[in-house]
Amino acid sequence: MGNASRPFRRIAYFLCLLSVLLLTEGKKPVKPKCPAWCTCTKDNALCENARSIPRSVPPDVISLSFVRSAFTKIPEGSFLLTPSLQLLSLANNNLQSLPKDIFKGLDSLTNVDLRGNAFNCDCKLKWLVEWLGSTNATVEDIYCESPPEYKKRKINSLSPKEFDCIITEFEVYQSLPYQSLSVDTFSYMNDEHVVIAQPFTGKCIFLEWDHVEVMFRNYDNITGTSTVVCKPIVIESQLYVIVAQLFGGSHIYKRDIFANKFIKIQDIEILKIRKPNDIETFRIAEDWYFVVADSSKAGFTTVYKWNGNGFYSHQSLHAWYRDTDVEYLEISGKPHLILSSSSQRPVIYQWNKGTNEFVKRFDIQDMEDAYAVKHFKVKEDVYICLTRFIGDSKVMKWGGSAFLDLQRMPSRGSMVFQPLQINNYQYAILGSDYSFTQVYYWDAEKAKFVKFQELNVQAPRSFIHVSIDKQRDFLFASSFKGTTLIYKHVIVDLSA
């Protein structure tokens, strides 16, 4: 009986051993097979008429070539599973571009063949130019097929500096549910602030950056009547605000840090300032000033000077001319004012050191009915943007003795043509009551503005740049008929 069971025991033993062997064999990694359209040896793989980059190429191959392939794009990470590659040929495959990390992990590469492809040398290929300048692998000469300005250029000889891949744009970031006229920014107690004039509620609205909510929020108001300008000025760490009103007179307020509110300290003489339209603040030597452009028939554009306790009338300019705008600037290192008027050409005044007053110098020719003049500088050159409600607005350049025409912008219903600089980018923004606001970008090579972007702002009256923590840049756009908009200045790297 015991002898009879022995064959069964042997059979069971062999079956058990066979099961263990099969399980052990199943745990071994399956070696990738050579793709159907490729010919593989121990070290090489040659693929013809491949529809895509195969994922099953043996990982130990050191040479991989694609011939007459049907694909025109290569997915990212296509060669991550073949880290031993020394030779990679993608020649003659109608490729227009290559993914940025195509050679990532291929530290053993010694030869790369990319000839015979129709490369589009745009920002997406900038990385390849950088890689060609740093790799130790041998790469045969390859050429651009497009765009036209790069056609037949040798990619191996291009410099990354030839690719202008950084672009900017303004995108809506926040909307404030009220109409506005003037917008100004100021630094006070180590923070950036914004003050907005609301004409219909008669308020000056003060905003600050909320670092938690990551947006601008209102923290205080000055309430008045028909407020048109709220102009801040900081003198010896003390904040003052000049509030210009159409009715009820204009006033000066002081920020009381102990009471944490604004206190009225002075009235502006109503006999001179009847219909204020614009205010500029400036400093000459050690003295602080502000000037109010008065647009009434009987008013005077007037300069006020700080005397240590308040502001007093220093000089009246341009009586009876209904001035709509005043701009302070320096020309050849000397202080100047430009007054715009609805009744004559813009007038330039120069500061006289002997009398400590402004003296009329000359008019800006061929620019009648300029509503406003704003200036900007490119290196040492001085330019002005002149706004016209009807007719062409202009950009003019200081030529040494006069401003000369540089560029005309078609404008209809424009009351603001504001140049502003954000970091190294120079813009000019031309608003309109009847169409989209046009943003122009300064082209350094052409030495003029080129069209850049359109913004949808209803009846814009002012634009200003606000920088937060030197990391975020915003454009405030006031609106006389709609909501006040805040745009974020966005920088995009097209080569990323």
Image: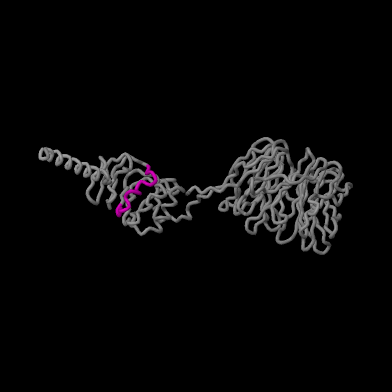
- Identify the residue at image location x=81%, y=43%: 223
Between 405 and 378, which is closer to the camera in this rendering? 378
Q: Does 75 appear in magenta?
A: yes
How many numbered marks appear?
0
Q: Can residue 339 be seen in this view?
A: no
- Identify the residue at image location x=47%, y=54%: 162
- Identify the residue at image location x=28%, y=53%: 62
Q: In which quarter of the image is the N terminus?
A: top left
Q: Is residue 382 visible?
A: yes
Query: Quarter of the image holding residue 349?
Result: bottom right
**Highlighted magenta segment, given as a residue range:** 73-87
Which residue is situated farthest in the bottom direction here? 354
Secondary structure mostly seen in magenta is: loop
- Identify the residue at image location x=83%, y=41%: 225
Left/right placement of residue 267 relative to residue 91 reads: right
Left/right placement of residue 102 relative to residue 395 reads: left
Residue 60, position as x, y percentages in the image: 27, 51
